[in-house]
Image (cartoon, helix red, strand yellow):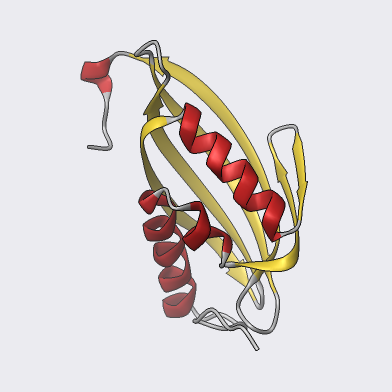
Amino acid sequence: MEQKLPLPPFTMESALEKVQFAENAWNTKDPEKVCLAYTIDTEWRNRTDFINGREEVKAFLIKKWENELDYRLKKELWGFRENRMAVRFEYEWHNESGQWFRSYGNELWEFDENGLMAKRYASINDMPINFNERKLL
């Protein structure tokens, strides 16, 4: 059986570790690696996209990182309980035209007993920024 440590129920230490693992994985921009943190039948809402299953997650991430260039992400634990977490995040990226953006958001996560994310609900807003306004270098 697949497992992704740490496992729920989470403590402060294990919740912080889980968030850091997620941040590290997403910053690789490797859809193959990132999608392995999710259950086969994971449910996502990402902005207005509804994504179902690990294979759809992988396809979504491939497209995302083809368009969001030089992507850099920072996540922060907002709260947790048993097998659920609330996380705030920001990331910076630019499009093909060179316009930079900072994207802000919140995620609600729910994990199965094996530490795989079964549900992810993300609300995200983008703000155009100038190159010299970047914080996440």
- Give the quadrant of the C terminus: top left
Nearer to us in this view, 16 or 66: 66
Residue at 48% from the left image edge and 32% from the top image edge: 66
- Location of residue 87 in the rendering, given as x and y in whole percent from the top left corner: 54, 54
Q: Is residue 132 visible?
A: yes
Count all numbered tags in the image, as a single digit. Answer: 0
In x, y percent, where is residue 117? Answer: 65, 67
* Residue 120 visible in the displayed image: no
Residue at point 52%, 23% (across, down):
126
User: Percent x, y for residue 90?
Assistant: 44, 39
In this rendering, the answer to whether 42 lies above or below 2 is: above
Please identify the quarter of the rendering in which residue 106 is found: top right
User: Is 91 positioned to the left or the right of 79 in the image?
Assistant: left
Quarter of the figure that contains the N terminus: bottom right
The percent position of residue 93, horizontal first and vertical second, equals 38, 29
Which one is nearer the viewer's eye here, 19 or 36?
Answer: 36
Name of the residue lying farthest toward the bottom: 1
